Structures are given as structure tokens and as C-alpha cells.
Amino acid sequence: MNKGKLLYEGKAKRLYATDDPDLLWLEYKDEATAFDGEKKEPLPGKGALNNAISSHFFALLTAHGVAHHFVKKVDGQSQLVRPVNILPLEVVVRAVAAGSICRRLGLREGWELPRPIVEWYYKDDALKDPLVTEEHIRLLQAAEPEQLQHMRREALRIYDILHPFLQRLGVLLVDFKLEFGINAKGQLIVADEVSPDTCRFWDVGSGQKMDKDRFRQGLGGTLDGYREIWKRLQQTAEGGAECTR
Ligand code: UDP
């Protein structure tokens, strides 16, 4: 399988065509960005870590019957994925208060929510990805009500898979962001990535952050956190770098 023409370049990944129209080549970049790209830094090794971590999580989701775009890891920084049309929404699940919900609602960082909640953000750089309601989403024609229902159910199901899995590794899953897309068969499936760039992971023992907040907040040792997550994931038999679908 060869990497073909560059189709799209985002902040954290590049997407290429391959010889097979049913497969795309997704390459994770060695760069960290935050605050809509305002803060940006080369971070050698980040691409390989996120590729490995995201591949592992997608394989875990496969084992639990979650439909997603990941096919297999092909090299250090790259994986093959199915083509999808991404919906312009970020689906955030929160179990513990951190980040924007603290600023918006005045919550204390670390407060455990009575139950996990789902939030929707409209992907639009000019608008800075605003928090939106389901009615806003209908107004913007960003998704149908049945699609929202499906994404909410899948997002909470993914929380129910990831939370106990990570708990066993001594990692608290604080929150995470998912993106969904429509594949060639018209199915709405999980796409993008599941990594310390898109999830908040705290060490259960020390409360230490092991995710992109280390970069966002200038705490230093960003990649040490990512490495620690990868080290703990490797201790598990579940997951793996590949799935056969
Ligand atoms: N998130 C993301 N991409 C974004 C915004 C958020 O992956 O563009 C993730 C973020 O890593 C966290 C969760 O979504 O795991 C909730 O983020 P929050 O709304 O608190 O954003 P913040 O403003 O703190 O980055």
C-alpha cells in the first residue's frame, strides 16, 4: 500500500489517497497545536505516539462492536482508514469537570459529574467551534435528529468501554472528543482519532495530567504524559494495532 496524493492537511494529521479508493492514508504529525492553532510547536515523536495510541483504542472499540473508520496501522506515524464524510460536529463526553465547562459554568476542576454528559460543538474555524444545542444543529442542518441520537448513544457507549478499561490502568478518563462521518455504505461511524490530543487522561494516584493540557497549560513534559499512556496501554491484551474489518 502506497501513500498517494495529499488530500487534506489539518493541525495534527495529513490525509493522503492510496491506490485503493476504499482506503485513505492518515499520517499523524510531529507537531502540537492549541487554542485554534495560536500556540504551535514541533514535537518530535508525538505523531508515532498518537498513531500507536489511537490505533490501540480503535482496536479496543472494534472488540466491542463500535463501527469506526480505522483499518490498520501501516507504519510508525500512519494508519489506513476508510473514507467518510465528516459531520461538522465535535461530540464531547464529560465525566469530570475540566477545561471549557469549568470556565463556562464556574465548576471546580476535578468535580465528578453525577453522570457523564454529552455536548455538541459546531466545527467552524471562523466561529471558533461554538457550543451548540440540538436545535442549533437542526437550524444549521449539520445533522438530523436521528443522527444526533445515534451519536449520543455511541459516545456514551464508548465512555462505558473506555472508562473501566482505563481505570484498570490507573488512568482517569476525564473527558474526550469524538468526530463522526458517513461512510460509503451511508453508515454514521466514528472517525478522526482517540488520543491524548482529544481526551483528558489523569493519573488516578497522583492526579497528574497525561494529555494535551500539559502543552495547553505550558506544564512541560507533554510527551512524557503521552509515553506513559502508551506504556500502560501496552500492558493490556485488549486492543492492538490492527483490525480486520
Ligand atoms: N477537544 C478536542 N478538540 C477541540 C476541542 C476539545 O479534542 O477542538 C477535546 C479536549 O482535548 C478535551 C475535550 O475535548 O478532552 C473537552 O474540551 P474542552 O471543551 O474542555 O476544551 P478546552 O477549551 O479546554 O480545550
Image (cartoon, rainbow, N blue to C red):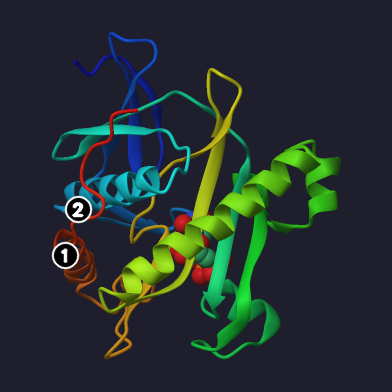
Percent position of residue 239, x then y: 26, 50
**Can you say whether 121 is above or below 226 in the image?**
above
Viewer-proximal residue among 55 and 141: 55
- Quarter of the image containing the N terminus? top left
Viewer-proximal residue among 16 and 35: 16
When asked about the image quadrant of residue 80, the answer is top left
The answer to whether the residues at label 2 and label 1 have Cβ atoms under 8 Å apart is: yes
Viewer-proximal residue among 98 and 40: 98
Q: Secondary structure at mark 1?
A: helix
> Residue at coordinates 23% horizontally, 37% vertically from top-left?
242
Residue kind at label 1, given as amino acid type: Arg
On whether ligand 1 comes within 8 Å of the CB at mark 1, the answer is no
Q: Is 128 left or right of 138, judged from the image as shown?
A: left
Percent position of residue 97, x then y: 55, 81
When asked about the image quadrant of residue 232, the answer is bottom left
> Residue at coordinates 39% horizontally, 70% vertically from top-left?
164
**Can you say whether 225 is above or below 122 in the image?**
below
Q: Is 18 left or right of 10, judged from the image as shown?
A: left
Task: Let me know if residue 58 appears in the view.
Answer: yes
**Can you say whether 18 is above or below 46 in the image?**
above
Residue 108, numbered circle = none
> Residue at coordinates 54% horizontally, 75% vertically from top-left?
95
Q: Provide the residue designation for mark 2.
A: 49
Q: Provide the residue designation for mark 1.
A: 227
